[in-house]
Image (cartoon, rainbow, N blue to C red):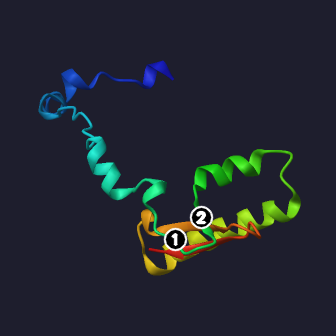
Amino acid sequence: MRDQIIPIDTRYPSFVAHEEVAKTMTASYPDAAFWMQVYQPMSDVKTQDGFKSVCPWGMAAELTDAATPAQRRKNILDSLKTGLKTIRQYDLPAYRIQFMEHRSTREISVWVD
């Protein structure tokens, strides 16, 4: 296999010139203020009485907990699937989907902001 490897710098000088043109770009990420506008704090989410906003990461953590009952797991999975289906169906950005938990029944529903 090593016999098949040929150095390209001597036989093909155009590749060397092409390498000099290529530059590495550093990734630039927006500051925290940008993300606060995209993903608002959970305390700023406006809800109706009897509902509270639930973080999807918290829902995922609850799924990995062995003490979570089967019915609760089913409700979490169904709501995550519904949220993903809604995102794809209406071509929405992820921040438009809100997971709302009914305070008394603990059933999670999907709302679109």
Mark 2: few, some, or many residues within 10 Å (few <14, many ≥20)? Answer: some
Disc 2/disc 1 C-alpha distance (Å): 7 Å
State the SS at label 1: loop
Q: Position of residue 98 (x, y in %)?
A: 52, 67
**In the depicted view, which residue is nearer to us: 69 or 64?**
69
Identify the amino acid type marked 2: Lys
Relative to 17, residue 61 above or below? below
Image quadrant assignment for residue 19? top left
Residue 33 place in picture, x, y as percent: 27, 46
> Residue shown at 39%/56% (left/top)?
40
In the rendered structure, the answer to whether residue 30 lies left or right of residue 38 reads: left
In the rendered image, which residue does mark 2 sit on?
Answer: 52
Q: Quadrant of residue 50?
A: bottom right
Residue 111, how many percent across, how many down?
54, 75
Picture disc at residue 47: 1
Q: Earlier in the sequence, mark 2 or mark 1?
A: 1
Residue drawn at x 60%, y 50% as measured from the top left: 57
Q: Is residue 61 left or right of residue 42?
A: right
| Disc number placed over residue 16 in the picture, else none | none
Q: Residues within 10 Å of mark 1 (few under 14, many from 20)?
A: few
Q: Amino acid at mark 1?
A: Thr
Q: Is residue 89 above or below residue 30?
A: below
Contact? badges 2 and 1 (CB < 8 Å)? yes
Residue drawn at the location 42% of the way across and 75% of the way down: 91
